[in-house]
């Protein structure tokens, strides 16, 4: 069989470029796999030449930098940066799912934004997002992807994929709200042992379920009512609570705008990621950490009666 038979077709390349490749950071999901840091091996796995593979990855990162540069044209944003609680040499870890793992996503835009405006700070940025992770899967890798980095700040951005309602089991979410509460409590307690700085809780953005249902890729649905319950759990946490009502994807009115998403209605477009960075910077600059509210799990999930 010739090597060309293993290469992606033109249609497959288009899907990789416009949707999949920015989330296919397999070296983070399988860090111990031999050859996983070899770009040639990774390129072969997705059916691309190594130069095509690297060029696309570079394009995503360049997109994130351009988004940061455009964001910094807003004087309000630069004012927020002057008020951030970060200190020089801080290590900042983002612990999330594919919305964080995105190579042109909010955390990469944040990294460029701070490096451009505070080059002397020498921040260390660690993107510990793994695509499509639930809070249960994230908890399993907490040691490797958070604790081992000895962070000063941890941004937790989980919950979207906990709320999957599988087509084979639509009457329940993949992870119950009570388990999400327990998982995030465990994450919170471990972070407290690492740093005196409070956790930064980045709530899941809304989804546009109708867009999601048009994609054959998914075998599940995610609904706003379920995500609203996740945000309610997070608003009881100790720390910074970013976008507690899930409003950052609505540029006009109350409903999320389609241009802030990729074609799946789940993952933000660059404009959606910029909205997340704005919400994060504003919250850190202008708000005090939340002191926490409930010590009890969600009532509807807490009882077996």
Image (spheres, rainbow, N blue to C red):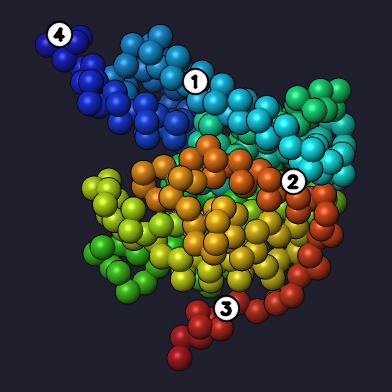
Q: Quadrant of the N terminus?
A: top left
Instruction: Name which of mark 2 and mark 3 comes first in the sequence.
Output: 2
Q: Which residue is mark 1?
A: 59
Horizontal and vertical percent for residue 298?
57, 78
Mark 4 to mark 2 CA distance (whole Å): 51 Å
Horizontal and vertical percent for residue 263?
36, 44
- Dot 3 and dot 1 residues touching (CB under 8 Å): no
Mark 1 to mark 4 CA distance (whole Å): 29 Å
Judged by depth in the image, the label closer to the viewer, 1 or 4, is: 1
Bin the neighbour count of mark 4 within 10 Å (Cα to Cα): few under 14, some 14-19, many 20 and up: few
Mark 4 to mark 3 CA distance (whole Å): 57 Å
Viewer-side residue, 68 vs 110: 68
Judged by depth in the image, the label closer to the viewer, 3 or 1, is: 1
Q: Residue furthest front?
A: 252
The image shows residue 174, relative to residue 49, as above or below, that is: below
The image shows residue 289, relative to residue 44, as above or below, that is: below
Q: Which residue is mark 4?
A: 2
The residue at the point 46 percent across, 66 percent down is 224
Look at the numbered disc 3 and give the secondary structure of its residue.
Answer: loop
Query: Looking at the rendered structure, which numbered label has been put on residue 281?
Result: 2
Q: Which residue is mark 3?
A: 298
The residue at the point 54 percent across, 26 percent down is 63
């Amino acid at each position: 069989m010739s090597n060309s038979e293993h290469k992606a077709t033109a249609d497959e390349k288009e899907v990789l470029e416009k949707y999949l490749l920015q989330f296919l950071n397999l070296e983070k999901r399988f860090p111990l796999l031999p050859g996983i840091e070899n770009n040639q091996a990774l390129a072969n796995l997705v059916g691309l030449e190594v130069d095509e593979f690297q060029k696309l990855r570079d394009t995503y990162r360049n997109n994130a930098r351009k988004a940061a540069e455009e964001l910094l044209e807003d004087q309000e944003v630069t004012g927020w940066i002057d008020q951030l609680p970060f200190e020089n040499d801080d290590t900042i870890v983002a612990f999330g799912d594919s919305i964080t793992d995105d190579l042109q996503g909010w955390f990469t835009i944040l990294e460029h934004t701070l490096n451009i405006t505070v080059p002397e700070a020498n921040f260390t940025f660690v993107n510990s997002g793994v695509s499509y992770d639930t809070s249960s899967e994230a908890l399993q890798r907490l040691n490797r992807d958070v604790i081992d980095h000895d962070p000063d700040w941890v941004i937790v951005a989980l919950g979207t994929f906990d709320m999957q309602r599988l087509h084979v089991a639509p009457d329940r979410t993949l992870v119950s709200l009570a388990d999400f509460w327990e998982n995030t409590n465990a994450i919170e307690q471990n972070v407290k042992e690492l740093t005196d700085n409070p956790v930064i809780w980045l709530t899941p953005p809304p989804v546009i379920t109708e867009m999601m249902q048009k994609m054959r890729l998914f075998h599940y649905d995610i609904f706003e009512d379920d995500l609203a319950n996740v945000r309610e759990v997070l608003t009881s946490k100790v720390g910074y609570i970013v976008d507690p009502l899930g409003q950052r994807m609505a540029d006009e009115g109350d409903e999320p705008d389609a241009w802030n998403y990729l074609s799946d209605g789940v993952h933000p477009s660059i404009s959606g990621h910029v909205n997340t960075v704005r919400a994060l910077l504003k919250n850190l600059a202008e708000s005090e950490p939340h002191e926490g509210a409930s010590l009890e799990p969600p009532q509807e999930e807490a009882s077996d009666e």
